[in-house]
Image (cartoon, rainbow, N blue to C red):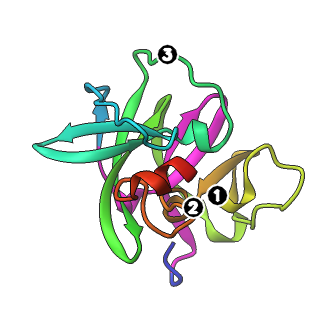
Amino acid sequence: MSENQDFMTALTIRLEDELFAVEASRVREILDLVPITEVPSAPSFVGGLINVRGRVVPLADLRVMFGMERPEPDEDTRIVVMEVDIDGEPTIAGILADKVHDVTDIESASIEEAPKVGMRWRPEFVKGIGKRNGGFIIIPDMERIFETPGGRSASVATPEERANA
């Protein structure tokens, strides 16, 4: 989120019945579901690898990180390809979305820090919670989600680090 703006321009996506927002400036493209290659011994939140214009891209399922059910994909399921900073390096990654809604502005003043208790999601993976139209929008901390405890991304972690992630 830019410090000199009064709002965050975000792409809103649905995971189960919850609305999430990712910074629109980081989104590269939105894809229909494509074939996914599973990776043995990868952390459970890494859904596999996808081919995006000839490039191998790790695909993450945020529902796993947030303890949600993983329904079968349907006609609304999309892959959001975005840039995430991992260990200071810009990295292209994909995330699964049950549905992609729209690009919207969320007022910075309406974004609050995630409470440490009373949430169904792991607070360390939530950058903030925004308010829009009387409802809440969860803003995930994508950099933290894509890191393993050892500080290396899940896509480049050693087999031992992946087993412990």
Task: Place residue 50 in its image quadrant.
Answer: top left
Q: Which residue is mark 2?
A: 141
Task: Place residue 7 in its image quadrant.
Answer: bottom right
Q: CA distance from mark 2 to mark 3?
A: 25 Å
Q: Are marks 2 and 1 in contact (CB under 8 Å)?
A: yes
Q: Are marks 3 and 1 in contact (CB under 8 Å)?
A: no
Q: Amino acid at mark 3?
A: Glu
User: Can residue 165 be seen in the rendering of this structure?
Assistant: no
Q: Residue 81's x, y, as percent?
A: 32, 47
Instruction: Choose the circle earlier in sequence order: 3 or 1.
Output: 3
Picture layout, residue 18 above or below residue 144: above
The residue at 83%/61% (across/down) is: 115
Other residues around mark 3 within 10 Å, as few (<14) / some (14–19) / many (≥20) = few
Q: Tag on residue 125? A: 1
User: Can residue 96 be seen in the rendering of this structure?
Assistant: yes
Q: Secondary structure at mark 3?
A: loop
